[in-house]
Image (cartoon, grey):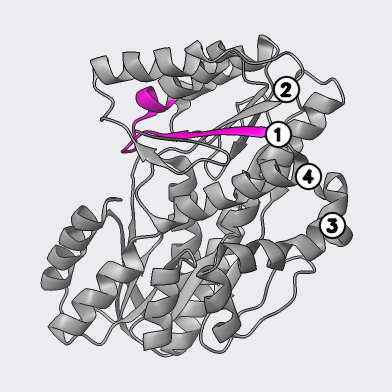
Amino acid sequence: MSLTHQGASRRTLPHLLAAGLVAVTASICSASLADDKIVIGFVTHHHLDQFQERIWQGARTAAADLGVELKLAAPDNVDPEAQLAIVQSLVNSGVSGIATPVTSESLVAPLNAIVDSGTPVVTFLLNSPNVHAPFVGERTFPTWKEFGKRVATKLGADAKGEVLVGYCSADLEILAHRADGTIAGLREAGPNLTVLGPFDVKLSATENYAAWEALALAHPNAVAMLDLCAPGIVSLSKLKTSGGYNWLIAGADTTPENLAAVQAGTAWMAEGQSEFLQGYMPVLMLIDAIRSGKKALDPSFFDSGNQFVTLDNADEPYDLDDVTFEELLKIANSPELTAAHYKKSLTGGQLKDWKSLLQPIENQNK
């Protein structure tokens, strides 16, 4: 598990074995929290990649902007039980609010119990409409249908051949919606393509590379490889270079590594979901609720916005300044530039009036 506090450097703790979890829980609970101090517990579902780090960056920025303490934590791997144990230990320590993704339906009842006990919750990145809390994340199916249509259009209206679709977990409903949208878009815009998948290509870099390597060997004549999670673009780019493949590569998340692959020409497109806002907005929403005396927030959906990034296109959502690819790459590699990029809208643009942007929770997949 990794655990950090606002204003402190990250330190790595032992894996969440039983003894380690007890030690971590005791450490968190031993800190008494003053009644008048707002402390937000922010728990991601793992800490394996740059994507999660960019979410943490957004949360850190919000806490600093709004003058509250932030307790950041994550299990080393995707493990709903370990994630829940961290969340519950933070609640027991007296945090003022909790932000966390919903990685399994098994988290729904415990999170609702936390809300019922008087601690507000906001979910982000991965959701369940059954949690009695707001969700900050992408609008899944239509976004990924557009992704699939763009890939098929790039291949050409008359293109034929196999297009493989992979995602990092078969257990997450939101990834199933990504796959459904991608496949629908591919079939609509590329009726002659043979779409295969979705394949479970895992999350860790090592497992992801091995999964795609096996698929590449089994489908040597594929025309496109699409990974709907963060590690895929890098894995596929390495395989394409070493194996001499000619696939079109596209996938999820505008991490510096993925953008570097687009810049190098090994990948064509990276789809971003404004991960900075997925860290910033839950903290902002929780602090607003706490300072106004709310113990719970009504379920709602805040669309974090999407970007379809190629060398020729780097349009931004909301009223964020559109940037060139080179500018976006600089922003992605700089926490300071990232914060400055969003601050203009957060302090005086569309995002300042964020409450007007809240939608019914059911809109998340429409």
Residues at badges 3 and 1 in contact (C-beta under 8 Å)? no
Q: Mark 4 belongs to which amino acid?
A: Gln
Q: CA distance from mark 3 to mark 2?
A: 24 Å
| Along the viewing direction, whichever of 243 and 216 lies nearer the viewer | 243
Q: Dot 2: few (<14), some (14–19), or many (≥20) neighbours within 10 Å?
A: few
Q: Dot 3: few (<14), some (14–19), or many (≥20) neighbours within 10 Å?
A: few
Q: CA distance from mark 3 to mark 1?
A: 18 Å
Magenta region: which residues?
69-83
Looking at the image, tell me whether mark 3 or mark 1 is earlier in sequence order.
Answer: 1
- Per the image, label 1 sits on a secondary structure element best described as loop
Where residue 190 appears, as percent x and y from the top left, is 45, 79
**Horizontal placement of 329 versus 134: left or right?**
left
Q: Which mark is residue 359?
A: 4
Nearer to us: label 3 or label 2: 2
Looking at the image, tell me whether mark 4 or mark 1 is earlier in sequence order.
Answer: 1
Q: Which mark is residue 37?
A: 2
Looking at the image, tell me whether mark 4 or mark 3 is earlier in sequence order.
Answer: 3
Residue sitting at x 72%, y 22%: 37
Nearer to us: label 4 or label 1: 1
Nearer to us: label 3 or label 1: 1
Q: Residue furthest front?
A: 8
Which residue was labeled with disc 3?
347
